[in-house]
Amino acid sequence: MDRIHPMASTDCRNQTSIADFILLGFGHVPKLQIFLFLLFLMIYIVTVAGNILIVALVVADRHLHTPMYFFLGNLSCLETCYSSTILPRMLASLLTGDRTISVRGCMTQFYCFAILAATECYLLAAMSYDRYLAICNPLRYATLVNGRVCFQLVACSWTSSFLGSTIVIILMSKLIFCCSNEIDHFFCDFSPIIKLSCSDTRLLELTVLTVSSIGSLIPFLLTVASYVCIITTILRIPSATDRQKAFSTCSAHLVIVTVFYGTLIFVYIVPNTRPSKDLHKMFSVFYTVLTPMVNPLIYSLRNKEVKEALRKALNKVLAFARFQTVKCNEMGIKRSGDPWE
C-alpha cells in the first residue's frame, strides 16, 4: 500500500478539506456508458434473482435442510447484499453521469463492502470444513456438524467481520482529505481512499494488515488445507465411480473458491501500477460483480439436489397456475349463464 509521506502532505493541509469524492469508474469510455449500464443492470437482476431463488429453495425444501445448504443459503443472502452495496451506485453513475459521492457515503460503502467480503471468506472456509468432514470423516459428520455448530460458525463469521471492519472504519473516519478527490475505481475501496488522505496512515495500514490477515488470509489457508486433505482422500478411493461421486460433492464450492480468491489475490497482491490499473478494475469486477452472479448458477447447474428442488418448485408453480386457470374458466362459465347479465 502507498503511504502518505508527512512532508508531502504539508502542502495539502493548507487547502480546504474536501466533502465529496469522484468515482472515475468507467468514465474514460463515454461511448460505452449506455452499454455498460444495460450490461451491469442485467447482471444485477440475474444476481439478485438467482441468489434469492437459492435462499427460497433452501428454506422451502426440507431435503435441503442440511449443513451444506444452510451455508449455501447464507452465502446467497450475503451475495445479494454484496451486489447491492456496489452495483446500484455504479448503475446510477452510468445512467446519469453523476460520479460524485460524499465522503460519508464513500466510507459507508467501504464499511459494508469490508464486512461482506470478510464474511464471505469465513463462510467459504466454513463450507470447505463441512466438505472436509463429509469426505474425510463421514462416520462422525452428523455428530460434528449439527445445526448448533452451523449456526455458531455463521454467527462467528458475521460477528468477526463486523468487529474487524468497525475498528478499521473508526480509524478511517479520522482521516482528513484535502488534496485530489478523484478515486480511480468504480467503488470505494481501501487503497484508493487512503491515497487521497493528508493524514498519517501508518497506524491505519498496520491495523488493516492485521485485520485482513485474520479476515482473509487465515480463512484462505484453512480452505486450502481442507482441500488438500479432501483431494488426498479422494485420490485414495479405489473406485473411479466413487472418486467422481465424492469430487462432485465439492466441485461447485471449489470452483467458487478458486474464482473468488484468484481474483482477490491478483487485485491486492499485484502492484497497482498505472499500466495495470485497468486490469485491476477488470479483476475487481470479477470478485465484486461476476462472482455473486455465478455462485447460484454454479450450484444450480452442478448440484442434483438443487436442480431437483427447483424442478419440484416449478411443478408446484405450474400446478397452481393451472388450478387458477381452471377456476377462472369455471367462474366465467357461471357468469355467462347468469340471466341478470
Image (cartoon, grey):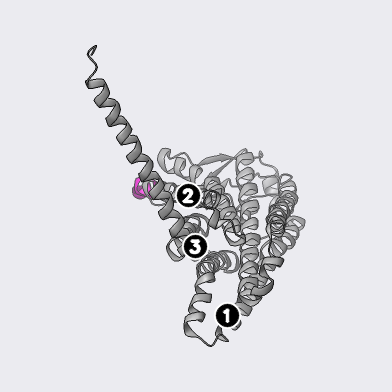
Q: Mark 3 belongs to which amino acid?
A: Phe
**Which residues make up the magenta segment?**
30-37
* Near-viewer residue (131 or 114): 131
Q: Mark 2 belongs to which amino acid?
A: Leu
Q: Label 2 crowding class (10 Å Cα cut-off): few <14, some 14-19, many 20+? A: some
CA separation, marks 2 and 3? Answer: 26 Å
Q: Helix, strand, or loop for circle 3?
A: helix
CA separation, marks 2 and 1? Answer: 31 Å
Examine the image and state in which quarter residue 65 appears: bottom right
Where is residue 307 drawn, in percent x and y?
43, 59
Asked whether residue 132 is in view, the answer is: yes
Q: Identify the residue under disc 3.
A: 283
Q: Helix, strand, or loop for circle 1?
A: helix
Examine the image and state in which quarter residue 229 appears: bottom right
Q: Identify the residue under disc 1.
A: 231
Foreground mark, 2 or 3? 2
Q: Label 1 crowding class (10 Å Cα cut-off): few <14, some 14-19, many 20+? A: some
